[in-house]
Image (tube, rainbow, N blue to C red):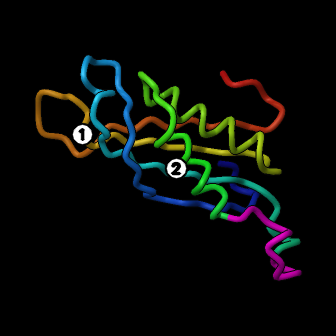
Amino acid sequence: MTDAADHITLRGMRFAGRHGALPGEQATPQPFEVDIAVTLDLAPAAASDDLDDTVDYRALFDLAQDIVENRSFRLIEAMAGAIADAVLAAHDVDEVEVAVRKPQAPLPGDFETVEVRVRRLRGEPAS
């Protein structure tokens, strides 16, 4: 995220979804965590104290929840990209960064989580 801009961040949203590349991963819901950080000018909202002058973080939560709980992806990279693209399509933000964590990834040892992070800028194609 750029240093000179304002941000709204939702961290640690928890949802259950059916995602994964291995057989059986999409059969049973498993936990996923999502962070969304958007960059936009918050000066109008700071001056007006009006929700219409900002991005309602409830809408960001609802968007992430809908994608995680109602769609299915083989890769968390695809899920993170879908969330980022949906945020840009639905909200007037300059930049969005999305992290998706899969704490129960099928790994053969002890670990805290697997995380993917994507960043999209308005007007730039996803790389």
Q: Position of residue 113 (x, y in %)?
A: 28, 42
Disc 1 crowd rating (10 Å Cα; few below 14, some 14-19, many 20+) is few
Q: Quadrant of residue 3?
A: bottom right
Indicate the amino acid at tag 2: Gln
Report the span colored magenta: 46-56
Q: Is residue 41 left or right of residue 38?
A: right
Q: Is residue 118 left or right of residue 72?
A: right
Q: Which residue is mark 1?
A: 104
Position above or below: 61 against 109: below
Using the numbered discs, state the Cα–Cα distance from disc 1 to disc 2 in whole angstroms.
18 Å
Q: Is 100 covered by the magenta stretch?
A: no
Q: Quadrant of the C terminus?
A: top right
Q: Is residue 4 left or right of residue 29?
A: right
Indicate the amino acid at tag 1: Gln
Q: Position of residue 117 (x, y in %)?
A: 50, 38
Q: Give me the residue at 38% from left, 30% from top.
A: 19
- Which mark, residue 35? none
Q: Give me the residue at 46% from left, 43% from top.
A: 69
Count of numbered badges drawn on the protein? 2
Position above or below: 117 against 91: above
The residue tagged with tag 1: helix, strand or loop? Answer: loop
Q: Is 54 covered by the magenta stretch?
A: yes
Q: Which residue is mark 2?
A: 65
